């Protein structure tokens, strides 16, 4: 390995689960001078932009746009519906639910956390117990991370909705779709989600910096009872602006809006159903390769059941802490950057493959070829024929 010629020069491939690969169309749309923010094209593009954004979330209700990252969208959503001293329930199947719960504590909420560890989806029976125990309805919201990017678990949001309905519990269902929107099937209205949060740099393929809070009438009714909401986070003027500047409470994120417009054109040009189907098909090819590698005994899926795996990110484990050396090899020798083992106790033994957004079949084959090459260089035991298995899965 040490005497090898570096082979990383060429177009690099960032295969981490966000920020994701930026389409050339998005970059080109952003490469322009600042527009007038008081009149003209920028202002005129907003109704269609918010409409198309709501289509991706599967909602006909409201959207508020913020200049922030995913952490910002957590705080934005909570600030509108959770008053200090109120309780939220956080069923955690990965690092991101803990993050959202910490954010809730930061605004003065009490958090009931149910920790399902780093490899398991929600156990709905345990969530039901917590909701049943709450006969006085102290729990005002359930913080539901759809796809947890650290573990690659995909939780069952419709089942959680059904549970709340069965128990007649009035808590708001709040979904974090930062890693799933534009990748995994998500239908806010059809699934009965009250508040959905997402950010632009994953399935929405735009550089980090804007985020979105979608909310329905039930959430708006809770908002109306709040003793106070900070003016900057208040979703009301943003979702129903009388003047253009109210969309953003100040100067618009002009270039992000152009980039987002191009990204939404890509999504709707392909068709949302097709976008979801592409992610599913590519994920299955990746898993087919991983199944073969796993035969060597060193590589394991973090999530054993394919039915609860995300189609946008795959978390993997390598014995003897070989995740970090593998990542270092692909990055420095091959020009392929893989995701770190985020939030994992055995950090060095974990890595993640990002396959969200602007990713096609030949990119997936290149990524898998990079992993195969690194395993060969590092002498990691593995089953033979992983790339053939992925090719066969793509060809079916
Ligand atoms: C990326 C991510 C976040 C955090 O987003 P930032 O932009 O890094 O603040 C939160 N939740 C999920 C599920 C994510 O994938």
Image (cartoon, helix red, strand yellow):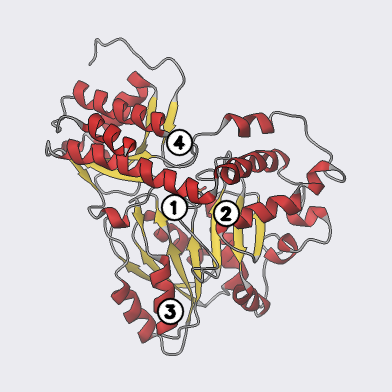
Q: CA distance from mark 2 to mark 3?
A: 25 Å
| Dot 3 crowding, Cα within 10 Å, few <14, some 14–19, many 20+ | many
The percent coordinates of residue 190 (x first, y second) are: 52, 68
Visible in this render: residue 118?
no
- Earlier residue among tags 2 and 1: 2
Name the disc covering residue 359, or none.
4
Residue 388 image position (x, y, % from top left):
24, 30
Instruction: Provide the secondary structure element on which disc 3 rests.
Output: helix
The residue mark sitting in front, 1 or 3, is: 1
Label 3 sits on residue: 164
Q: Residue at x 65, y 60 (%)?
A: 63
- Where 236 sits versus 262, above or below? below
Give whichever of 81, 39 is nearer the camera. 39
Residue 378: x and y in percent read: 19, 24
Dots 3, 4 in contact, CB < 8 A: no
Task: Identify the secondary structure beneath mark 4.
Answer: loop
The dot on residue 142 is none
> Please, which residue is most extreme toward the bottom here?
136
The residue closer to the viewer here, 46 or 318, is 46
Q: Give the residue number, with chain letter if any, for mark 2.
A: 56
Question: Distance between the Cα atoms at labels 2 and 1?
Answer: 11 Å
Cβ of mark 3 under 8 A from ligand 1 = no
Q: Residue at x 32, y 73 (%)?
A: 124
Q: Quadrant of residue 119?
A: bottom left
Q: Is residue 9 above or below residue 141?
A: above
Q: Which residue is mark 1?
A: 184
| Label 1 element class | loop
């Amino acid at each position: 390995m040490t005497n090898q010629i570096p082979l990383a020069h060429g177009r690099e491939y960032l295969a981490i689960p966000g920020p994701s690969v930026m389409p050339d169309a998005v970059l080109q749309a952003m490469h322009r001078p600042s527009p007038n923010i008081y009149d003209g094209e920028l202002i005129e593009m907003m109704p269609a932009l918010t409409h198309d954004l709501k289509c991706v979330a599967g909602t006909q209700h409201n959207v508020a746009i913020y200049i922030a990252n995913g952490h910002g969208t957590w705080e934005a959503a909570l600030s509108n519906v959770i008053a200090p001293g109120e309780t939220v329930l956080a069923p955690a199947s990965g690092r991101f639910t803990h993050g959202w719960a910490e954010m809730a504590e930061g605004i003065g909420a009490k958090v009931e956390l149910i920790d399902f560890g780093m490899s398991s989806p929600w156990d709905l029976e345990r969530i039901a117990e917590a909701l049943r125990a709450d006969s006085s309805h102290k729990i005002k919201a359930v913080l539901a991370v759809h796809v947890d990017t650290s573990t690659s678990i995909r939780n069952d949001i419709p089942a959680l909705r059904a549970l709340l309905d069965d128990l007649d519990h009035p808590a708001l269902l709040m979904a974090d779709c930062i890693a799933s929107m534009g990748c995994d099937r998500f239908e806010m209205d059809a699934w009965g989600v009250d508040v959905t949060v997402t950010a632009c740099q994953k399935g929405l393929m735009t550089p980090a910096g804007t985020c979105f809070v979608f909310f329905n009438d039930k959430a708006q009714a809770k908002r109306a009872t709040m003793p106070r909401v900070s003016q900057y986070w208040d979703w009301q003027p943003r979702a129903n602006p009388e003047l253009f500047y109210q969309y953003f409470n100040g100067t618009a994120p002009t270039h992000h809006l152009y980039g987002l417009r191009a990204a939404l054109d890509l999504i709707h040009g392909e068709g949302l159903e097709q976008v979801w189907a592409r992610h599913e098909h590519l994920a299955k090819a990746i898993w087919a390769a991983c199944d073969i590698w796993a035969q060597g005994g060193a590589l394991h899926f973090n999530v054993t059941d394919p039915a609860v795996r995300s189609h946008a990110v795959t978390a993997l484990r390598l014995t003897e802490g070989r995740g970090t050396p593998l990542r270092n090899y692909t990055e420095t020798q091959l020009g392929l950057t893989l995701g770190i083992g985020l939030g994992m106790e055995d950090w060095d033994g974990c890595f993640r493959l990002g396959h969200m957004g602007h990713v096609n079949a030949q990119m997936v084959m290149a990524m898998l070829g990079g992993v195969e090459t690194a395993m060969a260089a590092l002498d990691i035991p593995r089953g033979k024929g992983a790339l053939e298995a992925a090719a066969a899965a793509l060809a079916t």
